[in-house]
Image (tube, rainbow, N blue to C red):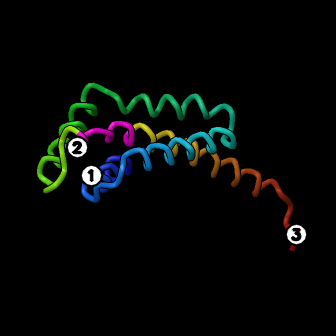
Amino acid sequence: IGVALGAFRIVTGTPLHWYIISGYVVVIIQTAFAPRLIVPLAYDSGGVTTSTVTVPLVAALGLGLAETIPGRSPILDGFGLIAFASLFPMMAVMAYAQIGEWRAKRIKQPNNH
């Protein structure tokens, strides 16, 4: 999802900082409400995206896409996909934990019918 959003940003030409700032705001809010034990795992899952295979592949995708879109500069628009690729695993892991915690609380509540 992160790479797709980054590719959308390159195609539309919207500023990178809009997406990055809003993504980090979501991560900070999720950090405040996520179960404490899952937060380190979520942040580690964001770091896993910077592997020796992912970075060159995603960077090449961004640079190639920015080069082929008329009016886009590979130097300005081709970067930022790695940041997107790192944000979304963190969001997904924390969201999964939050949904799991919510469902567990819901099961424990007595029926009020």
The residue where tag 3 is placed is 112
- C-alpha span from label 3 to label 1: 50 Å
Amino acid type, residue under disc 2 in the picture: Gly
- Magenta region, mostly helix, strand or loop? helix
Task: Please tell me which residue is depicted at 30% across the width and 56% down the height of the picture.
Answer: 8
Front tag of 1 and 2: 1
Return the x and y of residue 41 as percentages of the image width and height: 55, 30
The answer to whether residue 18 is left or right of residue 27 is: left
Decide which of tag 3 and tag 2 comes sooner along the chain: 2
Q: Is residue 84 magenta?
A: yes
| Residue 102 at x, y percent in the picture | 70, 52
Q: Is residue 67 left or right of residue 81?
A: left
Which range of residues does the magenta coloring cover?
Answer: 76-85
Q: Give coordinates of residue 109: x percent, y percent.
A: 83, 57
- The answer, for residue 92, to whether it is visible in the render is no
Relative to 73, say whether 54 is above or below.
Answer: above
In the rendered structure, which disc, 3 or 1, sits on the residue that comes first in sequence? 1
Disc sitting over residue 79 in the figure: none
Helix, strand or loop at label 1? It is: helix
Q: Residue 82 lies in what quarter of the image?
A: top left
Q: Closer to the camera, 53 or 19?
A: 19
Where is mark 2, residue-wise? 62
Image quadrant where one finds the C terminus? bottom right
Q: Residues within 10 Å of mark 1 (few under 14, many from 20)?
A: many
Crowd rating for badge 3 (residues with CA inside 10 Å; few <14, some 14–19, many 20+): few
- Identify the residue position indicated by label 1 in the image: 10
Badge 2: few (under 14), some or many (20 or more) residues near its Cα, within 10 Å? many
Q: Nearer the viewer, residue 106 or 81?
A: 81
